[in-house]
Image (cartoon, rainbow, N blue to C red):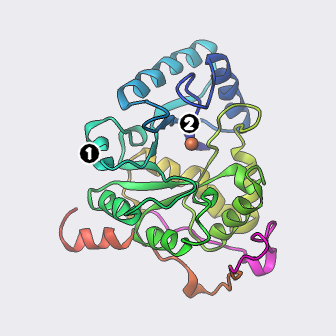
Amino acid sequence: MLDLHCHILPGLDDGAADVSVSIEMAKAFVADGVQVVACTPHILPGLYHNSGPQILQATSALQQVLDREGIPLKLVAGADNHITQSFVAELRSGHLLSLAGTRYVLVEPPHHVVPPRLEDLFFSLLIEGFVPILTHPERLTWIEQHYQTVKRLAQAGVWMQLTSGSLLGAFGRQARYWGERMLDDGLVHILATDAHNVTRRPPNLSQGRAAALKRVGAVEAERLVITRPQAALRNEDPVNWPSPEYEISASQVGYNDAPKAGSNVAKPAHTPSDRTSAEGGLVGRLRAVLGLG
Ligand SMILES: [Fe+2]
């Protein structure tokens, strides 16, 4: 498996506190069946002042440590890029980082407020030829009020990254419900750990995969943790990859955690027409029609 979101680099953010924790995390990843990990520390102005060149350097330094220790884990550089006003320019300049230098880029919105012009940012990234990956939408406190926005973004070609722990209940009832709901609605492209340590937020991709499998079946579960992450790191065009699929509807499985009391969110009634048919995304088709490659 490949994990495209984790905080394994030592001392750069609230992830691994030092290199001994990084080594423990690396061992845990290997034991869990993960061969490739993207090192994605926060880049968050005012809190985590990381930058592209520093992350690239820290990634190769940690790779040397793992090689010396004989731990068979391949690291690639990336970043947990929080939304800023000049996001696209900072990505072009190399201050923000895509995953392994590809067109695929993690984008983390604020957890408690919807930023102004959220959709504009994602659309401008798509038009620029990037594939934004929205990090753990199921954990955003505003997902309930803005689920249609999430759907629109997915339909336009934005990839959605679910966090393993959400499906395991590690982030509470709401995150679990929305994680399951998004899987059922065919809105999830990849599953990642967002691991920060080996205790409270550990490498747990195989458990997450098993939880996802119960809802979407083995083929789609494999796409979440192997096929699509691999395609991303090879910088392949997303139009070549199938849209997310669900196999088992909520009506058959039920939800582990219903929305909080008083929620007016209706449970989904699945029909094939409910499905997201991203097919590479509306923006991708628009780009093709306009000859933008
Ligand atoms: Fe993260």
Measuring 39% from the left and 65% from the top, which residue is drawn there?
119
* Horizontal side of residue 14 vs 97, given as left or right: right
Residue 244 among magenta residues: yes
| Disc 2/disc 1 C-alpha distance (Å) | 28 Å
Classify the position of the N terminus by image quarter.
top right
Q: What amino acid is at disc 1?
A: Ala
- Mark 2 or mark 1: which comes first in sequence? 2
Q: Which mark is residue 36?
A: 2
Badge 1 residue CB within 8 Å of ligand 1: no
The quarter of the picture showing ligand 1: top right
Question: Splitting the image into 4 quarters, where does residue 264 fall?
Answer: bottom right
For label 2, the crowd category at 10 Å Cα-Cα, with few meaning under 14, some 14 to 19 and many 20 or more, is many
Badge 1 marks a residue whose secondary structure is: helix
Badge 2 residue CB within 8 Å of ligand 1: no
Q: Which residue is mark 1?
A: 89
* Horizontal side of residue 46 vs 199, given as left or right: left
Residue 164 among magenta residues: no
* Horizontal side of residue 86 vs 132, given as left or right: left
* Horizontal side of residue 51 vs 113, given as left or right: left
Classify the position of the C terminus by image quarter.
bottom left
Residue 35 image point, x, y percent: 60, 35
Magenta range is: 241-264
Badge 2 marks a residue whose secondary structure is: strand
